[in-house]
Image: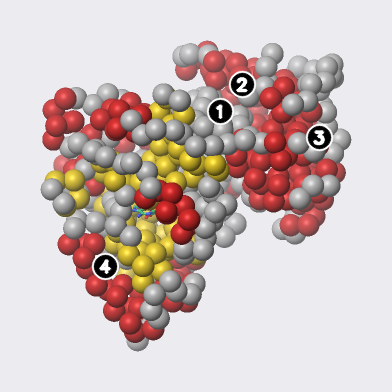
């Protein structure tokens, strides 16, 4: 049974023929140790100790699981088992009732912790789960078609797990690990375990798209031989919101690279040989959604990886996202929509070119490579303005640029540090975003209620949350207007399938639906557990492109509230 499509033989070391794989219980005990302390050094020591004991294939599996997913990032397979299948498996394994699950979910707000709480008996199947069992089970679930068949495999897997193991199985399958372990810390632990430089581990992980491969390379001292893997999407670098223009100067020194912030969908374009693929912000393959971009991308000689925003233009003006959105979410786009809303790819960064990995180079250099690409037709780069001033002059220049961007139909500005490297998946101060009225937050829906009057029979009232510094969801408001009847009908179906607890008029749901909410102000309040409440919240739009991990934080909401209080 292959442990991953990216065979470890590619690492340049023969895979050892180990007959006994390490018990998953040891992995879970290490995860417990990581979770139980807030101290980075202790987390790292526990991880390093454990990883150092593993054979190659177990090491690769263990490292990938600590990164939170069943498969390497470079691997496009998904389990697609679904929340209700998980709830089902927990019900069966624990013998608990749906009410018990609801009550436990209210206590823990984490389905993995619910499983650990409710599963009290040892598994009937006495064969202890090993890391290789897990990898094989994930391979099987991903390869199986049909919801029922997947459910059966999941139930069989959970039947062999103790409560403590089930906690992490559920977290991994549910895609929400939250054990206070960032990938950076995992890389540190790998480096420490095998006496390598952490930068070298991070680099091999970034290039290969597989922390498991990086770990095995660290063990065998072949980190330097890692190469950039095309068609393994890299986590997208994120921006930090800036609430007022004067704040830009506090983040980094001039010069500032300034571009329009285009309001479309994020995409990463890969080309090698004749193959071209597009990946979404959630790193899913979305190539077929934009057929008109493929030939122009293929026409560019050589290999490359571009970071970009896809949207539609009418003349020089950007088409509003709400209109462009009508062609998204469909697997194949009709000829009509292609004609009405043709896609343009605005490439604002380049991560690889002709075999050269560029992520570690400063933005100023990447920008030169980007602008040297022969982009034509629906491919373009944003106009780049370099602002080299400070104080009032800087604010005045940014104000002018902001207004100009808005007049072109764009959302605002991106201000970038030309000295910065590309940091995959990180939200830092090197990219700042200055948005619209600065009065919207991206939040996740946690509970829904049946509507009244015209909205009777649909789940139309949404309670939503932001994320605190520990990754916990904190409620901040409730909104019931802003979506179309069609969107509400679709969401009703979605929420019915993802109900954790049915309280009659209201349902607690899986927190998987991200919405952008506008508000008049945010103020202190004891109505919600965030200690804040939005006044006059209304839903601006759905954000299916945005993963729940990237919703706005409690810190940002507090910052907005603080500004409201200021005279
Ligand atoms: P937000 O979605 O509000 O977190 O803002 C960050 C997003 O802005 C990125 O994920 C991109 O999709 C988008 N974006 C639009 N224009 C640019 C640009 N010029 N540079 C970087 N990101 C951009």
**Quadrant in which the N terminus is drawn:** top right
**Quadrant in which the C terminus is drawn:** bottom left
**Can you tell which quarter of the image residue 528 is in?**
bottom left
The earlier-in-sequence mark between 2 and 4 is: 2
| Camera-nearest residue between 352 and 164 | 352
Q: CA distance from mark 1 to mark 4?
A: 39 Å
Q: Secondary structure at mark 3?
A: helix
Counting the numbered discs, the total is 4
Q: Which mark is residue 5?
A: 2
Q: Secondary structure at mark 4?
A: helix
Q: CA distance from mark 3 to mark 2?
A: 20 Å
Q: Position of residue 354 (x, y in %)?
A: 49, 37
Residue extending furthest toward the bottom: 567
Judge from the rendering whether residue 476 lies leftward or rightward of residue 232; answer left or right: left
Q: Are marks 2 and 4 in contact (CB under 8 Å)?
A: no
Q: Are marks 2 and 1 in contact (CB under 8 Å)?
A: yes
Q: CA distance from mark 3 to mark 1?
A: 23 Å
Q: Which mark is residue 220?
A: 3
Q: Are marks 4 and 3 in contact (CB under 8 Å)?
A: no
The residue tagged 1 is: 75
Judge from the rendering whether residue 147 lies leftward or rightward of residue 391; answer left or right: right
Viewer-nearest of discs 3 and 1:
3
The earlier-in-sequence mark between 1 and 4 is: 1
Which residue is at 54% across, 42% downward?
356
Q: Secondary structure at mark 2?
A: loop
Q: Is residue 376 above or below residue 286?
A: below
Which residue is at 61% across, 32% downward?
72
Q: CA distance from mark 2 to mark 4?
A: 46 Å
The residue tagged 4 is: 402
């Amino acid at each position: 049974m292959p442990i991953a499509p990216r065979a470890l033989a590619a690492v340049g070391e023969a895979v050892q023929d180990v007959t006994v794989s390490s018990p998953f219980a040891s992995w879970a005990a290490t995860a417990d140790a990581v979770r139980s302390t807030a101290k980075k050094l202790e987390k790292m020591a526990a991880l390093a100790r454990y990883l150092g004991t593993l054979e190659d294939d177990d090491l690769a599996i263990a490292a990938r699981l600590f990164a939170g997913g069943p498969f390497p990032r470079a691997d496009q397979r998904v389990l697609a088992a679904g929340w209700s299948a998980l709830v089902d498996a927990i019900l069966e394994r624990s013998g608990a009732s749906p009410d018990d699950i609801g009550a436990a979910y209210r206590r823990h707000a984490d389905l993995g912790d619910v499983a650990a709480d409710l599963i009290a008996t040892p598994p009937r199947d006495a064969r202890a789960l090993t890391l290789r069992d897990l990898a094989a089970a994930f391979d099987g679930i991903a390869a199986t078609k049909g919801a029922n068949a997947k459910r059966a495999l999941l139930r069989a897997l959970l039947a062999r797990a103790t409560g403590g193991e089930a906690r992490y199985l559920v977290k991994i399958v549910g895609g929400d690990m939250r054990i206070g372990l960032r990938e950076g810390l995992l890389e540190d632990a790998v480096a420490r375990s095998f006496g390598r430089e952490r930068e070298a581990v991070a680099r091999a992980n970034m290039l290969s798209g597989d922390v498991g491969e990086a770990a095995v390379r660290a063990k065998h001292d072949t980190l330097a031989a890692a190469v950039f893997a095309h068609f393994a999407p890299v986590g997208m670098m994120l921006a930090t919101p800036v609430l007022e223009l004067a704040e830009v100067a506090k983040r980094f020194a001039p010069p500032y690279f300034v571009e329009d912030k285009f309001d479309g969908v994020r995409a990463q374009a890969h080309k090698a040989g004749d193959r071209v693929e597009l990946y979404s912000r959630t790193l899913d393959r979305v190539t077929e959604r934009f057929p008109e971009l493929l030939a122009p991308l293929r026409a560019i000689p050589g290999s490359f990886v571009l970071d970009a925003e896809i949207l539609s233009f009418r003349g020089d003006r950007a088409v509003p996202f709400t209109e462009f959105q009508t062609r998204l979410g469909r697997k194949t786009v009709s000829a009509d929509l292609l004609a009405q809303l043709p896609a343009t790819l605005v490439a604002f960064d380049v991560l690889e070119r002709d075999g050269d990995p560029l992520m570690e180079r400063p933005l100023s250099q990447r920008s030169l490579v980007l602008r040297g690409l022969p982009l034509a037709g629906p491919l373009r780069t944003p106009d780049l303005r370099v602002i080299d001033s400070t104080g009032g002059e800087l604010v005045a220049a940014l104000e002018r640029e902001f207004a100009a961007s808005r007049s072109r139909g764009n959302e605002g500005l991106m201000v970038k540090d030309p000295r910065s490297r590309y940091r995959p998946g990180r939200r830092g101060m090197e990219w700042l975003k200055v948005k619209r009225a600065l009065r919207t937050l991206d939040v996740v829906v946690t509970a829904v209620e049946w509507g009244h009057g015209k909205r009777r029979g649909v789940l139309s009232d949404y309670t939503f949350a932001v994320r605190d510094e520990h990754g916990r969801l904190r409620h901040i408001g409730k909104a019931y207007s802003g979506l179309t009847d069609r969107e509400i009908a679709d969401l009703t179906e979605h929420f019915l399938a993802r109900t954790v607890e049915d309280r009659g008029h209201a349902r607690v749901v899986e927190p998987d639906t991200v919405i952008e909410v506008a508000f008049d102000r945010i103020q202190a309040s004891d109505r919600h557990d965030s200690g804040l409440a939005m006044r006059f919240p209304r839903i601006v739009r759905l954000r299916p492109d945005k993963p729940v991990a990237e919703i706005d934080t409690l810190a940002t909401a507090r910052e907005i509230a603080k500004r409201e209080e200021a005279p």
